Amino acid sequence: MVLDVSKVVECDVLVIGGAGAAVMSAVSALREGADVCLVSKGKVGRSGNTIMIGGGFGIDGRSAYEVCGETAANQNFTKEQLFETIVKSSFYLCDQELVRQYVDKGPYAVKECLDWARKAGQKFFFIPPASLWMTSGRSFGKAVKQGVLENPAIRVFEDTIICDLLTSSTGVCGALGISIYTGEIIKFKAGAVILATGGYQPFSLKNSISDMTGDGIAMAMRAGADVVDMEFLLFIPTALEPQYIKGSILPYLMTIPNYFPLYPTITDLDGKELAIAEEYRRIPPANKMNKILYAYFWGKGIFEKLDKYGNAMYFDFSKYTDEELLGSFEKMMANVAPWHAKNHYNGINLYEVYEFLLKNNKRFKVGLGNEYSMGGIVVDKDFASTVKGLYAAGEVTGGVFGAFRSADGLTEMLAHGWDAGKKAAEYAGKHGKQTDSNTADVLERLQRVLEPGEGISPYLVISQLEQVCDKGFNFFRTGELLQEAEEGINRLKEMLPKMKTAVAERRYNFEWISAVLAENLILCAEAGIHAANLRTESRGTHMRADYPVVNNREHLYRIIAKLEQGALIHRREKPNAPYLPLPEENVATIPDYILASVKEDSNHEG
Amino acid sequence: MKVRVRRSGEKNGIDLFQVPAVENQWTVMDVLDYIALNLDPSLGYYRHSVCNQGVCGRCGVKVNGRPVLACTSKVQGEDILLEPLNNRVIRDLIVEP
Ligand SMILES: Cc1cc2nc3c(=O)[nH]c(=O)nc-3n(C[C@H](O)[C@H](O)[C@H](O)COP(=O)(O)OP(=O)(O)OC[C@H]3O[C@@H](n4cnc5c(N)ncnc54)[C@H](O)[C@@H]3O)c2cc1C
Ligand code: FES
């Protein structure tokens, strides 16, 4: 059997992805007069982390009033304040121009998405004090879908995974994909390509959708693009039990009193309390910086017994009566009722979880699961990557949030798509389509996996990668563990050429697709682990047990990675900081940094 | 737990797998993932864009004749039969999207 291209599709702008960043990019490119194709691994509006959300996303209060027409918005909350908060919570690692873009364009892009939501009949409620809208993942998905329904000129290819970008001597000029259900190979020729494929998640505990295999980041690297901040991954409390809710962010929601008034005692699996030190408890529970404090204080406890118990702690409600506990569950049910089936949060029956707790000493096992990857493709303020013809939007990019995302992934994807689509269309208009030189190479890679013979299942490779990352690249890191993880990655890289599927069938052969995913995820993990090893300090979500200091004097730089002749090369760059000066003093620990920045914020407000 | 799965193509018929599933704890998706990783990687089931939380609504399968979402449906009993949702089968448990 020889693989060949079954279909060739031509367009000006090819958008890869089927969620918020992709649809906003596609609509925006279409508005510029481009002929647009959108290709998504899943279905539009039913894939991507966009449908997994807790549900909140915001902009500054004045723009909520002026641009989005929310008359109850707090107009004292300005763009300038939002800008400062994002920069500080990025631990000053962000590209401040990209933060400006987020703050300036976010409101217009959000307004467009709110219009889609309204036309799709979805509930998006504005919460004035927080200057954010609340909805559900399913509703957000339907709003995004409305974006393509209203723009039928966008040609949509669903359930099609892009396996690699096509390149010419000038830059990127298309992509090659597999239509998952038929196994057909489709070649897309385009004037410009926008990657909107989301982040990467190489761990076994997932609260993100299974799409998060870092495809876009890895494809961009293979095409020669720079990536940045790959060591920064955001972890939040995620359910381990009951098994049937594993991966849910319910435990994280239980830490927010507006959702769930009772606060659990957090212990390790031996029952030892993992308390957040008193001075840090003054940070308001809704402040997203708490996510780092949880990973720091609870993660430390988990880390100490990682070999014995793995990534697990208890959320313990035993100090409360049955009635108090039920009261909290009922409050949660009422809160989520506008979007979810009766007594449910997504597919979870909350009464069942309550009953599970009653039968199990009112405690359940929770781990720290990866929610978001701060790192990704380096883009300039036009969302152009460092390779010509290649653009990126949404979580697949790196740079807006630096070491920690305190603002919203949803606003980010919309704001990015708003400009990326426009700029990619302009580029395509000027440069036209080039002829690629690597179709045969990509086909050969895809074919090798299907050929008969002994080999390693791609499923096994991905599962081993998760074990490597669980052990050495989790929320707490040390030089020794990272070294081990690097060695693990090297062993896995040797396995890649030996991957084979059990059958040569092409129709819905997910083992075959997984060979592509394995390569992508391993490349992303390699870039992240190596950067984490180089970063001998703690910053944002990168916590080094052996280097606790936020070392602004020596480490306030971004680590950029690039593939050169098949090998990853890392280099350092000072963050782009044209507005707020970079700090020069070190801070003893991550919690101290957070405390100081929250204090400064409240001084402003006061 | 005995898990019987209706296969298509060359394997046409019912395959039997022994899976260490915990009743009322594991989901049908957990069972399928276990089979694919440990017993038979050729099994076709919905796996390419999985929310695992009952959000995307795409993992439909029949369990003992009843249509369910694989990721939210808990396994029960000592013996289960997994079949495609309808007869528009592409491969094993996969039907046309
Ligand atoms: C559990 C959870 C809760 C969250 N809660 C919030 C919240 O409350 N508020 C908030 O602002 N943010 C939240 N986030 C973050 C937010 O969801 C994401 O940052 C955002 O949705 C990313 O949007 P995106 O369009 O960039 O990527 P995604 O939504 O991840 O979409 C990626 C798309 O690309 C497609 N794709 C991937 N690879 C390929 C390929 N090779 N070929 C073709 N298509 C491909 C996928 O199928 C998908 O359609 C949460 C994230 C998680 C996991
Ligand atoms: S995988 Fe999304 S509903 Fe089951």
Image (cartoon, coloured by chain):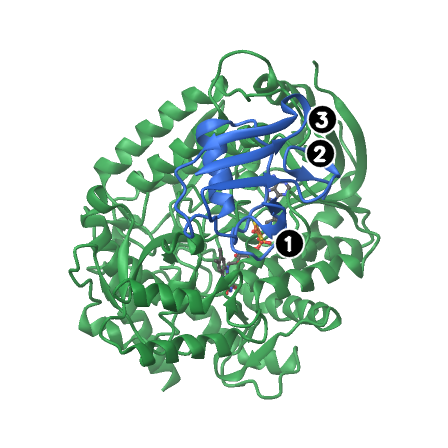
CA separation, marks 3 and 1? 32 Å
Residue for badge 3: A436
Q: Amino acid at mark 2?
A: Ile
Q: Is residue A256 left or right of residue A414?
A: left
Q: Residues within 10 Å of mark 3 (few under 14, many from 20)?
A: some
Dot in front, 3 or 1: 1
Dot in front, 3 or 2: 2
x, y percent for residue A107: 62, 71
Closer to the camera, A493 or A223?
Answer: A493
Chain letter behind tag 2: B
Q: Quadrant of residue A238?
A: bottom left
The label on residue B90 is: 2
Quadrant location of the N terminus of chain B? top left
Q: Circle 2 sits in a helix, a strand or a loop, which is it?
A: strand
Ligand 2 neighbours mark 2 (CB distance < 8 Å)? no
User: Mark 1 touching mark 2, by CB under 8 A?
Assistant: no
| Identity of the residue drawn at 49% across and 13% down | A454
Chain letter behind tag 3: A
Quadrant location of the C terminus of chain B? top right
Do pointers 3 and 2 mark residues of a single chain? no
Residue found farthest to the front? B78
CA separation, marks 3 and 2? 33 Å
The label on residue A46 is: 1
What colour do you see for chain B? blue
Q: Is residue A598 left or right of residue A434?
A: left
x, y percent for residue A495: 43, 21
How many numbered discs, if any?
3
Ligand 2 neighbours mark 1 (CB distance < 8 Å)? yes
Q: Which chain is green?
A: A
Chain letter behind tag 1: A
